[in-house]
Every structure is written in C-alpha cells, then in structure tokens.
Image: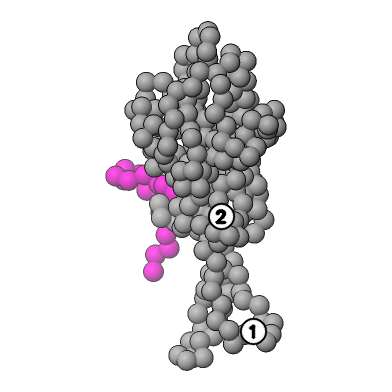
C-alpha cells in the first residue's frame, strides 16, 4: 500500500479546510453524564444530567414529581427585552453566549452555579405559591418583540393587575428618541419600559399592556429622573437592577400599598 503524501498535491479543485464539519463545531455545551443499568432489559444506558443520589430513605416508595422548571422560558423573554445584548448578559452571568442561547432555547441546561448567577442577574425568583419562576424586577426593559414584552408584563403584573401608562413631561420637550412606559402593579416596585419612537412595536404597546391607562403628564423633575435612570440602567447588565432599586426607593411612598399613577 502506498503511504499518503506528506504534502498536498498541486492543481486540485478543492482547498484544505477545517477538520470539523459544521455540526461538530456547533455542539451544545458539555454537560454531566452518567451510566445507568436497566434491570428490565439488562442494558446499560449513558444518560445526561447529574447522577441520582444513591442514598435510600423511607420516602423512596413515594412517587416524586418534578417541579415545573420554567426558568429558561422566563430568561428568554427577559433577555429579549434587556437593554444590553445577549453577549453582554452572558458575560455578566459568567457563561458563554452559546451556553446562554442553548439554555433559553431549552436545548441544554446550566449547572447550579450558572443558573444561580443568571437568576440573580435577571432578577428571577421562585414563587412557591405558583410553583414556578417569575421575574421579580424591578427592571428597565426595551420593547423589541411584542410576544416577549407582553409575556414579561403578564408575569410582572400578575396577569394584567396593573394600570400601565406612558409618561410625558407636563412642561418642556419629551425625549426625541424614546417613549417611556410605567408598569405599576399594585404594591410592587415600578418597572420602566423604553420604546423607540416611530417603531411599530411602540404603537402596539397600548394593546399589549393590559389595562393600559393612556398618557399621563408628570412633573419635569420626575420625567428627567425616569430618563436618567433608564440611561444609567442601560450601561451594563448589572446596572439594571441596581438603578431600578434606587429609583423604587426614591418613590416608595408613591407605590407601596397602591398602584402608582404619577401626576
């Protein structure tokens, strides 16, 4: 048998390329795996995920039901509305962009530490009463996709139990680039939604935000505070929650025990 040549032959109609094909270079992030022996078939299977504990207790005979894990769905909608791009969100959470994309598309999982960091960054809490994850806020969000902003609003407002409105200055000029909407669920820190002027999604917001109250003229000082807070919250993924918590504290007496409708 003739050994292969050490160099590529000349005058060929193809060019040398990477060894890996496209599907090999786009494999999902690595995840834990373990072997499990099937006593019925006698076969051994390689399964993904963490190996179950071998500890035996008195409750082993009771059927266990897994909790509804909707974290990826909640994170997907928040990422779609977050002021910063997904790459910046992933970096702030300590994961790669691919890991974030695969997780929110439910094609892969994250380890416990990464899940915790992502939940903390996006302000997601587990609601024991509802048995699932929910966006706790408060946030500065940008309306880009109608389905995402409507889903986040429904979660924050408890199914539309709010009186959202657009904020405009009672005197002076409004921001020429953005319109600002207030989500004011009862006894809940406010969330601000930025919507680009002239875009179709902005014109649809009154229909997407259930119980929309219309336009409210507010003091120039409050309007400037809203614009400034949004600008600061957009600087980095981590700044979002910090700036909105400070904003909520400044107006706590306005929204606590009521739905805030600023004058």
Q: For numbered disc 1, what is the local secondary structure?
A: loop
User: Which residue is located at x 56 percent, y 55 percent?
Assistant: 133
Residue 53 visible in the picture: yes
Q: Which mark is on residue 59?
A: 1
Place residue 36 in its image quadrant.
bottom right
Q: Main secondary structure of the magenta part?
A: loop
Q: For numbered disc 2, what is the local secondary structure?
A: strand
Question: Mark 1 Cα within 10 Å, few/some/many (few <14, many 20+)?
Answer: few
Q: Earlier in the sequence, mark 1 or mark 2?
A: 1
User: In what quadrant of the picture does the N terminus appear?
Assistant: bottom left
Would you place residue 2 above or below residue 149 in this image?
A: below
User: In what quadrant of the picture does the C terminus appear?
Assistant: top right
In this view, the residue farthest toward the front is: 257
Q: Position of residue 64 (x, y in %)?
A: 56, 77
Q: Which residues are magenta?
A: 1-21
User: Which residue is located at x 59 percent, y 23 percent?
Assistant: 226
In this view, the residue farthest toward the left is: 13
Would you place residue 222 above or below residue 193 in this image?
A: above
Mark 2 = which residue?
Answer: 133
Q: Position of residue 134 (x, y in %)?
A: 55, 51
Inter-mark Cα distance, 1 to 2: 26 Å
Q: Nearer the viewer, residue 161 or 109?
A: 161
Question: Mark 2 Cα within 10 Å, few/some/many (few <14, many 20+)?
Answer: many
User: Which residue is located at x 46 percent, y 56 percent?
Assistant: 106
Magenta run includes residue 9: yes
Place residue 87 in its image quadrant.
top right
């Amino acid at each position: 048998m003739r050994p292969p040549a050490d160099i590529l032959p000349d005058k060929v109609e193809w060019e040398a390329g990477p060894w890996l094909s496209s599907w090999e270079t786009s494999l999902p992030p690595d995840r834990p795996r373990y072997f499990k022996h099937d006593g019925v078939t006698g076969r051994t299977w390689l399964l993904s995920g963490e190996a179950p504990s071998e500890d035996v207790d008195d409750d082993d005979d009771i059927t266990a039901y897994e909790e509804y894990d909707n974290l990826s769905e909640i994170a997907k909608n928040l990422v779609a509305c977050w002021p910063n791009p997904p790459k910046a969100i992933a970096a702030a959470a300590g994961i790669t962009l691919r890991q974030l994309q695969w997780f929110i598309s439910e094609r892969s999982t994250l380890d416990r530490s990464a899940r915790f960091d992502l939940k903390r960054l996006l302000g997601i809490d587990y609601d024991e009463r509802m048995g699932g994850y929910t966006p706790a806020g408060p946030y500065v969000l940008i309306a880009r996709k109608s389905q995402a902003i409507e889903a986040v609003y429904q979660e924050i407002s408890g199914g539309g139990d709010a009186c959202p409105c657009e904020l405009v200055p009672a005197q002076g000029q409004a921001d020429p680039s953005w319109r600002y909407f207030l989500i004011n669920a009862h006894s809940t820190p406010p969330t601000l939604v930025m919507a680009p002027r002239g875009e179709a999604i902005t014109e649809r917001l009154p229909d997407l935000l259930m119980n929309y109250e219309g336009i409210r003229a507010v003091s120039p000082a409050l309007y400037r505070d809203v614009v400034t807070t949004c600008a600061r919250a957009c600087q980095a993924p981590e700044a979002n929650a910090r700036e909105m918590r400070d904003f909520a504290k400044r107006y706590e007496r306005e929204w606590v025990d009521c739905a805030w409708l600023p004058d």
